Amino acid sequence: MRFADLVTRGAAAVDASVLTWLGTYYSDSEIVELVMVIGLANLVNRFNDTLQIQPDLG
């Protein structure tokens, strides 16, 4: 969650120390996947917010 927050609030804040810390728990390919999922979630949120699309909660 901390990593997702850092990426969301400002990816420039993610430096080598953050990636080293994350690397103790995840492989390089898992970190890439995390960044892609976080980026996609942010894109979808911004898209929906901009167009004022309400979620379909079923």
Image: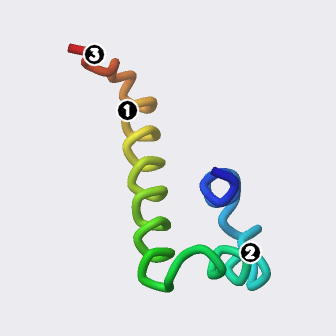
Q: Amino acid at mark 1?
A: Asn
Q: Pointer 3 and pointer 2: residues touching (CB < 8 Å)?
A: no
Q: Residue at x 76, y 68 (%)?
A: 13
Could you classify mark 1 by the number of other residues whose Cα lies within 10 Å: few (under 14), some (14-19), or many (20 or more)?
Answer: few
Please tell me which of labels 1 and 2 falls first in the chain: 2
Task: Single out the mark in the foreground, 3 or 1.
Answer: 3
Q: CA distance from mark 3 to mark 1?
A: 14 Å
Q: Quadrant of residue 22?
A: bottom right
45 sits to left or right of 13: left
Given residues 31 and 56, the one toward you in this image is 31
Q: Amino acid at mark 2?
A: Val
Indicate whether 43 appears above or below 26.
above
Please tell me which of labels 3 and 1 falls first in the chain: 1
Q: Residue at x 49, y 67 (%)?
A: 35
Q: CA distance from mark 1 to mark 2?
A: 30 Å
Q: Secondary structure at mark 2?
A: helix
Give the residue furthest to the front. 25
Please tell me which of labels 3 and 2 falls first in the chain: 2
Q: Which mark is residue 48?
A: 1
Could you classify mark 2 by the number of other residues whose Cα lies within 10 Å: few (under 14), some (14-19), or many (20 or more)?
Answer: few
Give x and y (percent) for residue 26. 54, 76
Q: Amino acid at mark 3?
A: Leu
Instruction: Please name the colour scheme applied to the rendered image.
Output: rainbow
45 sits to left or right of 54: right
Q: Quadrant of residue 40?
A: bottom left
26 sits to left or right of 33: right
Give the residue furthest to the top. 58
Quadrant position of the C terminus in the picture: top left
Q: Secondary structure at mark 3?
A: loop
Q: Which mark is residue 18?
A: 2
**Label 3 sits on residue:** 57
Given residues 57 and 52, the one toward you in this image is 57
